Amino acid sequence: MADSGSASERREEGKKGREEEEEDDVVCLDPSFFVDRSYETTTFTFGSQVLHLLCLRAASTDYDLTGQLVWPGAVLMNTYLSEHPETVKDHSIIELGSGIIKKNIEMQSCSGNANAVLTAEKLEWGNYVHISNIIEKHPSGFDLILGADIYILLSYFATLLLSLITSMDVLVLKEAEKHGMHVKEVDGTRTTISNLEGVIYDITLK
Ligand SMILES: C[S@@+](CC[C@H](N)C(=O)[O-])C[C@H]1O[C@@H](n2cnc3c(N)ncnc32)[C@H](O)[C@@H]1O
């Protein structure tokens, strides 16, 4: 009995020692370690509007960091808005999934060519805390909701979405119809930018 007791004590000590060594091997990395923040100032010209924005040239898609660069959808939308300024003039607007960073908001506010008050809020689709926070700050709502290239990024959806990506428009449009919205393709907006075909939809409540 005495022998087996000391053997189990030795085993226990060995296990403890190994656990301590493993703990010493653990390296704790701050989440920011995985985020590329090497933004470069890039100039975008939309009609008479010249925007200088800090953005990346490529985005990570394995985590939702896709908002770190300006996508062709945003180029299409901004080109359209610069040609049709009446769409946004004197309107209160929320842009979903803009991916804007604070520094870019500061840069537009300081540029002297922006009359609009620009702010950003966190909003994950369907997060009622985020939605309530926005409604509280903007109780009269918005005249216009903008969104460019804002497909849904939910991990359990990812595989399914990847296989459906080519019919993403169809999914979004069906969903809008289901929620009682009227969807109309804006004439003349079907365009190819960076080898990708894009189009603008005007979606209104029926
Ligand atoms: C492809 S980027 C487009 C960024 C910008 N609108 C543009 O066109 O350059 C997709 C944007 O949608 C946002 N997004 C996608 N799915 C989302 C979700 N489930 N909740 C919140 N934001 C989401 C991302 O964070 C990102 O800003």
Image (tube, rainbow, N blue to C red):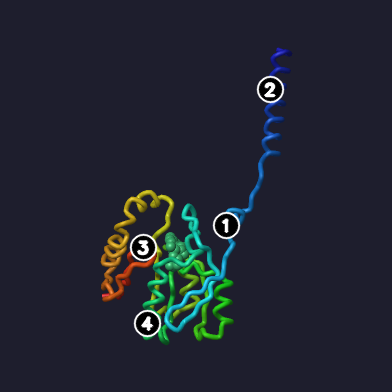
Residue at mark 2 to residue at mark 4: CA–CA distance: 76 Å
Which mark, by number, is residue 11? Answer: 2
Residue at mark 2 to residue at mark 3: CA–CA distance: 64 Å
Q: Earlier in the sequence, mark 1 or mark 2?
A: 2
Q: Position of residue 99 (x, y in %)?
A: 49, 67
Q: Earlier in the sequence, mark 2 or mark 3?
A: 2
Q: Position of residue 139 (x, y in %)?
A: 45, 79
Question: In the structure shown, which secondary structural element does the residue marked by tag 2 occupy?
Answer: helix
Q: Depth-wise, is mark 2 or mark 4 nearer the camera? A: 4
Task: Name the residue that disc number 1 marks.
Answer: 35
Residue at mark 1 to residue at mark 3: CA–CA distance: 27 Å
Question: In the structure shown, which secondary structural element does the residue marked by tag 4 occupy?
Answer: helix
The kind of residue tagged 4 is: Glu
Q: From this viewpoint, which residue is outermost toward the front?
A: 195
The kind of residue tagged 3 is: Asn
Q: Quadrant of the C terminus?
A: bottom left
The kind of residue tagged 2 is: Arg
Give above or below for 169 relative to 106. above
Q: Residues within 10 Å of mark 2 (few under 14, many from 20)?
A: few
Say if residue 199 shows up in the picture.
yes
Q: Earlier in the sequence, mark 4 or mark 1?
A: 1
Question: In the structure shown, which secondary structural element does the residue marked by tag 1 occupy?
Answer: loop
Q: Earlier in the sequence, mark 2 or mark 4?
A: 2
Give above or below for 47 relative to 13. below
Q: Nearer the viewer, residue 4 or 31?
A: 31
Question: In the structure shown, which secondary structural element does the residue marked by tag 3 occupy?
Answer: loop
Q: Position of residue 30 (x, y in %)?
A: 63, 53
